[in-house]
Image (cartoon, grey):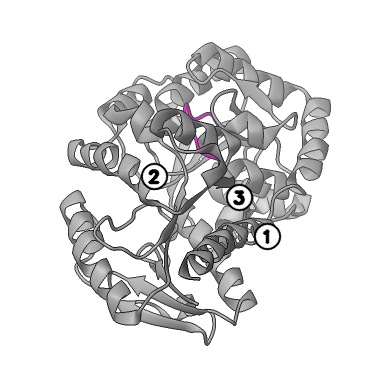
Amino acid sequence: MKIAVNTRLFIKGRLEGIGWFSYECLKRITTQHPEHQFYFIFDRKFDEEFIFADNIEPIVAFPQARHPFLYYLWFEHSIPRVLKRVGADLFFSPDGYLSLCSKTPSVNVFHDLNFEHYPEDLPYFERKFYRHYFPKYAHKALRIATVSEYSKNDIVSLYGVDNDKIDVVYNGANESFGPISEPEKQVVRERFAHGAPYFLFVGSLHPRKNLARLFPAFDQFKISDNDSVKLVIVGEKKWWTEAIEKAYNQMNYKDDVIFTGRLPVKDLHQVIASALAITYVSYFEGFGIPILEAFYCHTPVITSQVTSMPEVAGDAAILVDPMSISSIADGMARMANDENLRKSLVEKGIERSALFSWQKSSERLWNTIQKALDTINQEAK
């Protein structure tokens, strides 16, 4: 079968959450299913590292789809032309977008519907586009994959999609991540946190990541404990807002907050593995890959008790109310002052991590694609 794939998020050195999901799953799917022909559709010049196997043909279709107006042009004009030209049997889109103009059967991945719950967190045209088109994409798709039971239930509830049409595939995390030695940890602490123990945040600095409450929570923790613990923030300030800026500027202990920007994978691994704990207290997530990365690195986790995060963390994390600064601060204090708790959470995290891997994700995702291919074959008879 000919399977065309939206690979516009494959940008060398700039893979983020959905990009990593696409990379890890498609690398396995294409190499493990040589009986199918795949067409990777890019919106710019591509890097050869993304051509994983001989059964992949890369295609560049312009324009670069990085704005709602350009999303429309790419998916409703460029994509249909490519699908028709290659005679695609199926269009697979790992970032949720589809082509409403094309008659090619489609499978997409909805990672979450945060824009439905917190539209104010997105620029005006982005949220208008998402809220107008994503319900249409949900009904257009032959099948949908998503990354948590929470997101599946959200799609069913908000868009009225048949429950049986949606498969939960979960995420994995970088499997090169693992624990490091105490001497290595000390080197990392010297490099990134002036030699001090630190809480760690990893992710885009987006409003839903809740830095506007994490900063005052860290301040409150420092007032109570007043020890040497730092807060290290890993991620780009792409979505930095006035509310986040205000929360940071009002801190008494902002000198103990360290911004690293985006880190290479090797450095990210070391920073996670050396942390006192990660503080991943978003108020909305479809999955939460940093939770799993911390489990792989044998690092304790503080995360939120809402949306998908309890589903991922299970009993292997301190769960806090992301809307309560005091709850987050209390979680930090408990983690910093109780070594036995940290050890217990690490052990539970190791056990929990066995439930998730990119191989498991790719197998589940392929099962979704195969169901769609079976339907196409049945209808062709």
Q: Where does label 1 land, which residue? A: 175
Label 2 is placed on what type of residue? Ala
Sooner in the amino-acid sequence: mark 3 or mark 2: 2
Of discs 3 and 2, which sits in the foreground? 2
Which is more N-terminal, label 2 or label 1? 2
Residue nearest the observer in this picture, 173 or 261: 173
Q: Which residues are magenta?
A: 280-287
Circle number at residue 377: none
Q: Residue at x 35, y 19 (%)?
A: 250
- How far apart marks 1 and 2 lie (CA) works out to 31 Å
Find disc 3 in the rendering and name its residue: 169
Q: Secondary structure at mark 1?
A: loop
Q: Place residue 209 in its image quadrant.
A: top left
| Image height of 54 relative to 322, above or below | below
| Label 1 Cα neighbours within 10 Å, binned few <14 / some 14-19 / many ≥20 | few
User: How many angstroms separate mark 3 from mark 2 (CA)?
Assistant: 17 Å
Check disc 1 and give the amino acid type. Glu
**Residue, disc 2:** 138
Mark 3 or mark 1: which comes first in sequence?
3
